[in-house]
């Protein structure tokens, strides 16, 4: 009876939680003087969007390891046979934006289909050539989405150039 009471009173998680690295690897140094880390290859191989220095003693993330975007090599030199602890940010999955676009197309298709079926076309639109055309609702939804995306990108480009506020 006492053993059951001791088990109930003892904390359930009295073990040590230890995290091991996801990957341990050797990376060759590159560059003209063979002292630069191939950060681009590491990012591509492990599916990361950025890499940070990691202090194993304090278990804290340090500064981002900066690299040249043209050749993918680190800006700072490293000594041969040195041990570097890295922490990285995983790449954003491609499924999320695709799902968002598909849900938007579906929602727009439903809205356009309901409006075309239930609503009546205005007289001024019936007199034009556009009033006689029959578009499937999904085509109209895609056209609206493409128009909105192009409008947003054009505005961003105009802001970058300085033509718009």
Image (cartoon, grey):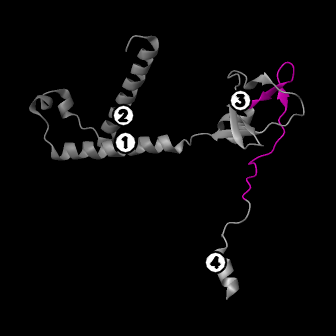
Residue under numbered circle 4: 8
* Mark 1 surroundings within 10 Å by alpha-carbon count, few (fewer than 14), some (14 through 19), many (20 or more): many
Q: Residue furthest left?
A: 123
* Mark 4 surroundings within 10 Å by alpha-carbon count, few (fewer than 14), some (14 through 19), many (20 or more): few
Dot 3 or dot 2: first in sequence order is 3
Q: Where does residue 35 sit, x and y in percent of width and height?
A: 85, 24
* SS at badge 1: helix
Q: Where does residue 126 sit, x and y in percent of width and height?
A: 13, 32
Relative to the observer, which residue lies in front, 147 or 130?
A: 147
Of discs 4 and 3, which sits in the foreground? 4
Residue at horizontal 42%, vertical 24%? Answer: 153
Dot 1 or dot 2: first in sequence order is 1
Q: Where does residue 51 sit, x and y in percent of width and height?
A: 69, 35
Dot 4 or dot 3: first in sequence order is 4
Check if mark 2's residue and mark 4's residue have beta carbons within 8 Å. Answer: no
Residue under numbered circle 3: 65
Residue at horizontal 87%, vertical 19%? Answer: 33
Dot 2 or dot 4: first in sequence order is 4
Residue under numbered circle 1: 105
* SS at badge 4: helix
Q: Which residues are magenta?
A: 17-40
Check if mark 1's residue and mark 2's residue have beta carbons within 8 Å. Answer: yes
Disc 3 and disc 2: Cα gap in Å? Answer: 38 Å
* SS at badge 3: loop
Marks counted in the figure total: 4
Dot 1 or dot 3: first in sequence order is 3
Residue under numbered circle 2: 145
């Amino acid at each position: 009876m006492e053993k059951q009471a001791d088990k109930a009173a003892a904390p359930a998680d009295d073990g040590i939680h230890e995290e091991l690295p996801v990957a341990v690897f050797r990376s060759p140094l590159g560059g003209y003087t063979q002292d630069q880390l191939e950060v681009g290859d590491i990012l591509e191989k492990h599916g990361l969007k950025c890499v940070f220095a990691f202090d194993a003693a304090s278990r804290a993330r340090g500064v981002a390891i900066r690299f040249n975007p043209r050749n993918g090599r680190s800006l700072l030199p490293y000594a041969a046979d040195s041990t570097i602890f890295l922490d990285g940010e995983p790449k954003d999955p491609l499924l999320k934006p695709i799902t968002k676009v598909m849900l938007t197309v579906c929602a727009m298709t439903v809205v356009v289909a309901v409006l075309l079926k239930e609503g009546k076309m205005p007289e001024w639109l019936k007199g034009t050539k556009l009033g006689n055309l029959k578009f499937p609702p999904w085509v109209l939804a895609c056209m609206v989405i493409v128009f909105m995306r192009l409008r947003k990108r054009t505005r961003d480009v105009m802001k970058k150039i300085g033509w718009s506020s």
